[in-house]
Image (cartoon, rainbow, N blue to C red):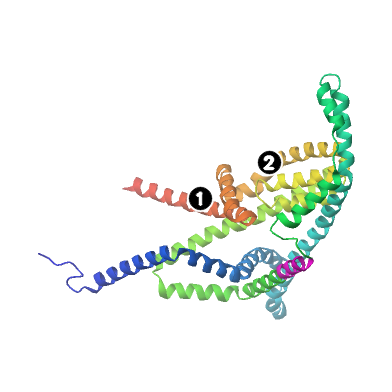
Amino acid sequence: MEKKPWEKGDWFGNRRAVRLMVLAALLVLAIIYFPNICRYLGFLWQVCQPLVLGAAMAYVLDIVVKYLEAWYFPNSKKTVVLKTRRLVCILLAAVIVVSVITLVIRMVIPGLMDAVTLLARELPVYAERARLWVVEHTEDDLPAVAEALREVQFDWATIQQKVMDYLMNGLGGILTSTVSIIGTVAGGVASFFMSLIFAVFLLLGKRKLHNQSQRLMAVTMKPRYIRTINHVFHVAHRCFSGFIVGQTLDSMLLGALTALGMTILGMPYPVMIGVLNGTMGMIPIIGGYIGGIVGAFLVFTVSPVTAIWYLVFIIILQQISGNLIYPRLVGSSIGLPGLWVIMAVTVGGGLGGIGGMLVGVPLMATVYRLVREWVAEREKTQTET
């Protein structure tokens, strides 16, 4: 009777058996210490989060840098231009991104705060007008309802106090003190600039990092594995870059059309709401509707009737954008059917919030394209055999 490989002392058999035992032991340890592992992974994520954000920022900035490099003396052969082109374009791209973010914050946040203050002041007046209108139009057909509404009195001071108590205590103590707010904002700003600095250094060392990774794979992997990995990254890059460029252009166009339409129709806050809709439009599918609702709230603080017309206008604009503009700017660049876009937004939003929505669509497009290529290759092989 022939002996098995590990009984003959075969090194391959022994190595495979050792690998299986180590894998089984690691699996058992992972199950036993699962809560501790999750806690350590959460701590590791908090530590590495600025670096991950910096890597994401570097990827987005690199798209801008490529466009800037095409405009920065592209035909010049001077040594100074060749040596400074990369650095100048990276710094210019960082300045553009920071300036855009600052502009959006300065234009949107103050307007939202003013609208909330105005609404809190005018809401009792609107409610009283609505109550009198309902009483006037129901006293003939529904006298009992009209009589009940006549006796209704709202204690707005108490209602506002309860709302403030909820904001102060019910949201996990986010607004418990001015010190905590300042600390949170300062920490976020510091983390953002640390990520931005890391992104700049990544872009400066992009070519060197690429060469090092290729050399490392060359000495640790077989050539077919290297080709597969490079192809996957190439497809992912095409999907992510196409999504970012297309989504940005679609959002800018949506914001411009919103501001232009509101200006023509004589609605309030056209520029601010246009910037808001353009910013929210970066979120696939639901971003435009979120911007529309917030915009309706801003218009409502000036004129409730105008807010209704604004909703009609924004619904029409969303239909035009979703059916004519978005498929050409984004859909053609990522090649993902609408059903899969909805699935990617739903799952990505459930797992990672807004960030998950932004990453979910191009990630799903990458998987979709790779699977489609694999199926086509398998069908071709079956046909040939």
Q: Which residue is mark 2?
A: 324
Q: Secondary structure at mark 1?
A: helix
Characterize the local packing of mark 1: few (<14), some (14-19) or many (20 or more) Cα atoms within 10 angstroms.
some
What are the residue bounds of the magenta stretch?
178-189
**Residue drawn at x 80%, y 45% as measured from the top left:** 297
Decide whether the magenta segment is chiefly helix, strand or loop.
helix
Measured as percent of width and height from the top left, residue 370 is found at 48, 53
- Residue 179 horizontal side relative to residue 354, left or right: right
- Closer to us: 70 or 180: 180
Mark 2 vs 1, N-terminal side: 2
Q: Which image quadrant for residue 353?
A: bottom right
**Residue drawn at x 83%, y 47% as measured from the top left:** 158
- Residue 230 horizontal side relative to residue 164, left or right: left
Measured as percent of width and height from the top left, residue 8 is found at 17, 72
Residue furthest left as drawn: 1
Residue furthest bottom as drawn: 79
Real-space CA distance between mark 2 and mark 1, rounded to the nearest whole angstrom: 23 Å
Image marks 2 and 1: residues in contact by CB distance under 8 Å: no
Amino acid of disc 2: Leu
Q: Is residue 267 visible?
A: no
- Closer to us: 325 or 298: 298
Circle on res. 368: 1
Measured as percent of width and height from the top left, residue 32 is found at 41, 64
**Residue drawn at x 57%, y 57% as measured from the top left:** 238
**Residue drawn at x 40%, y 65% as measured from the top left:** 224
Q: In front: mark 2 or mark 1?
A: 1
Amino acid of disc 1: Tyr
